[in-house]
Image (cartoon, rainbow, N blue to C red):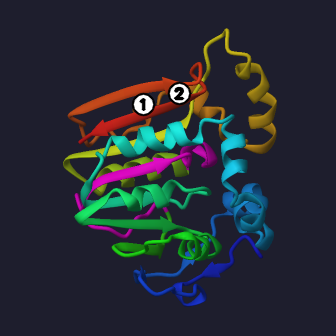
């Protein structure tokens, strides 16, 4: 796969019940994703290796379910309205989100990689009211204020600064006034947490953009042209992980 390989929706197989939304232009795999994360998200064997619940839980040191549920609880036990999930997630995050959808709830999932969209289609047991589309998180093809809730689960640390800023700006743009934008990602642990020292070589080797989320508050990356009504932050596992909820 070349850095500039173009992927269109025609290259993704649709399964009954899970819609594929049209895009207005071809979606190109970003260079940073191809060059840095090909082994985790783009290679044909990536899904086979990483789509294992025990493995994604191990990668997060046993905290996957806790962080998943913390994000979903921000939207309530029953979720009505339109939700946007920015980027597919290995494990059962989306499955648990779908289970919470109420009678008037719906979910849009976007990802820039066709293999990830196809994987999502194959693993959802109840794909009703779910639409998946190939989109770049830094240039979302949704109208302003079109979603009641937007969730970004462990994506920011995988993006270079310029892409991360655009992703955050786009996620906030498509969130309705009064709606929630929910981030879950890494965070700089407290000094007494041994994982503070274990994670440095892991992140600097495998996740070259991740240390940015240790050095900078997510709130500081929010665009200046939109003033949120409220920003709440909570940390987990000795500060290694964070949940930031922006109420627009």
Secondary element under disc 2, as helix, strand or loop, is: loop
In the picture of the structure, the residue carrying the numbered disc 2 is 216
Please tell me which residue is depicted at 41% across the width and 56% down the height of the picture: 97
Q: Residue furthest bottom?
A: 10
Picture coordinates of residue 131, whole percent (x, y): 40, 74
Q: Quadrant of the C terminus?
A: top left
Rendered location of residue 72, percent (x, y): 39, 46
Range of residues picked out in magenta: 137-162
User: To which quarter of the image does residue 190 belong?
Assistant: top right
Instruction: Give 244 or 55, whichever is nearer the viewer.
Output: 55
- Name above or below for residue 210 compared with residue 144: above
Looking at the rendered image, the quarter that the N terminus falls into is bottom right
Q: Which residue in the protein does label 1 denote?
A: 220
Residue 94 colored magenta? no
Q: Residue at x 32, y 59 (%)?
A: 83
* Vertical placement of residue 2 versus 186, above or below: below
Viewer-proximal residue, 154 or 50? 50
Residue plotted at (63% across, 64% down) = 30
């Amino acid at each position: 796969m070349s850095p500039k390989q173009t992927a269109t929706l025609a290259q993704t197989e649709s399964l009954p019940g899970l819609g594929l939304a049209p895009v207005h232009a071809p979606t190109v795999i970003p260079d940073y994703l191809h060059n840095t994360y090909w082994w985790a998200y783009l290679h044909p064997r990536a899904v086979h290796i990483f789509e294992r619940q025990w493995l994604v839980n191990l990668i997060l040191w046993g905290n996957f379910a806790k962080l998943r549920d913390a994000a979903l609880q921000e939207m309530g036990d029953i979720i009505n309205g339109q939700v946007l999930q920015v980027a597919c997630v290995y494990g059962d995050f989306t499955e648990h989100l779908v289970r919470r959808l109420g009678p008037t709830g719906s979910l849009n999932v976007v990802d820039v990689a066709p293999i990830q969209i196809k994987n999502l289609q194959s693993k959802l047991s109840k794909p009703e009211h779910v639409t998946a589309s190939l989109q770049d998180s830094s240039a979302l093809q949704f109208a302003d204020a079109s979603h009641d809730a937007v969730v970004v689960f462990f994506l920011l640390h995988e993006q270079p600064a310029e892409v991360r800023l655009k992703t955050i700006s786009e996620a906030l743009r498509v969130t309705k006034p009064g709606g929630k934008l929910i981030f879950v990602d890494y965070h700089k642990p407290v000094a007494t947490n041994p994982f503070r020292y274990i994670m440095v070589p892991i992140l600097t080797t495998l996740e070259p953009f991740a240390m940015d989320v240790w050095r900078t508050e997510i709130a500081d990356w929010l665009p200046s042209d939109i003033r949120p009504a409220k920003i709440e932050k909570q940390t987990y596992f000795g500060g290694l992980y964070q949940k930031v909820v922006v109420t627009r």
